[in-house]
Amino acid sequence: MSAPLNSLCEMPYTARIGPDVWTAQCLLQRGEVVAIPTETVYGLAGNAYDTRAVTKIFSIKQRPYTDPLIVHIGCMAQLEDVAHALPAQAQVLAKEFWPGPLTLLLAKKPAIPDLVTAGSPCVAVRMPNHAVTLHLLRQLSFPLAAPSANPFGYISPTTPQHVANQLGTQVPYILSGGRCRVGVESTIVGFEHERPILYRLGGIRVEAIEALLGPVRVANSPAPTQPVVPGSLLQHYAPTQPLTLGDIPQLLRQNREQRVGILAWDHYDPGVDTAYQRILSPTASLEEAAQHLFAHLRTLDALPIDRILATHVPDVGLGRAINDRLRRAARA
Ligand code: TXA
Ligand code: MG
């Protein structure tokens, strides 16, 4: 093992950010946890077969062990090691959307430790569509368990700097791969008696799935206290500041006494300093809005304000995933 790599592993870490797949590969092979880019959000990755590496992920994120992790694969051959035969409709979805922002809940094989699935017989699997991470996954002899690389409950990271800001001293290496192209997490689809159920709205639009499979049931969202997908709790993806969701002019009238930051859809509110406003998409594009969502929330969260005011976006396509994240971020 080279001296530089050893020095990377010395605590406390110095938040090294770089594009070097080989460094990430060596660290992962020796059981370390590394932040990786994907097209949705950055992940906090470790060897999915190694319970010590997986334990580190839970501990760095301060994530409850009841909330299972997605397993990332680099090719279809790796799928056979982690999951049993796919339901017919899962095959259709994997063929169409992998690599891409789709996670499938499948019957797990014994190679995946119970720790990864929080004791569930189902494993969540996805093949991410990011050239750097696909290359990394294809160099490894194991799949990567990876939740989003943020402290549990906080906003997901869409740049390497977001990861460094919060977890920089806890991971030896942040593999950089630019700003995430999609910007919201993967869509999660499970199967009940071979029928698809959508458990998390995300980067693959419901309409695109329904175009292939016909009408698909969307599980209660936000979920009750014991959801099938444990991470779909009512409050999640939340900034530190309170966030109120609604009609901005009306919210401004109701919050006259407070210092506010605004997350707007496609234009500034004329009554508020633009330094305290972020626009999701000046051209009213839902794709652009999804790319900006988490970065804008982080920027607003760092301002000297009392409250973030945010507005819904059109509830179609990626807009459904954006509105879902905003609802979860909102609290009184
Ligand atoms: O886009 C994404 O999916 C990103 C990138 C890094 O791949 N990952 C991500 O992971 O969002 P995380 O851990 O933040 O969210 C995964 C969700 C959680 O709500 C978790 O409860 C659910 O997937 N999940 C994971 N494994 C599961 C399983 N075996 N059964 C049910 N739900 C599962
Ligand atoms: Mg997450």
Image: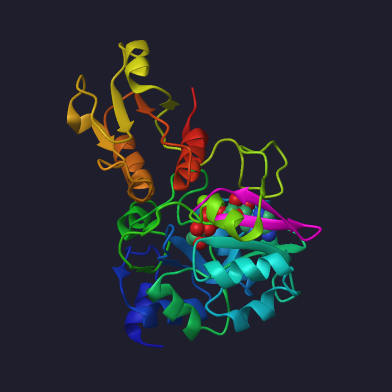
Q: Residue 155 in the image: x percent, y percent?
A: 43, 45
Q: Residue furthest right?
A: 193
Foreground: 131 or 259?
131
Ligand 1: quadrant of the figure: bottom right
- Write down the quadrant of residue 257 in the picture: top left
- Write down the quadrant of residue 209 in the picture: bottom right
> Which residue is painted at 52% across and 36% down in the image?
328
> Which residue is painted at 42% across and 32% down in the image?
312
Image colouring: rainbow
> Which residue is painted at 48% across and 55% down in the image?
203
Can residue 62 be seen in the rendering of this structure?
A: no
Question: Left or right: where does residue 304 sit relative to residue 118?
Answer: left
| Magenta-drawn stretch contains 192 | yes
Q: Which residues are magenta?
A: 187-202
Foreground: 156 or 129?
129
Q: Residue 286 in the image: x percent, y percent?
A: 38, 46
* Magenta span: chief secondary structure: strand
Foreground: 75 or 50?
75
Q: Residue 285 in the image: x percent, y percent?
A: 33, 46
| Magenta-drawn stretch contains 169 | no
Q: Quadrant of the N terminus?
A: bottom left
Q: Residue 263 in the image: x percent, y percent?
A: 33, 33
Can residue 122 be seen in the rendering of this structure?
A: yes
Q: Residue furthest bottom?
A: 1
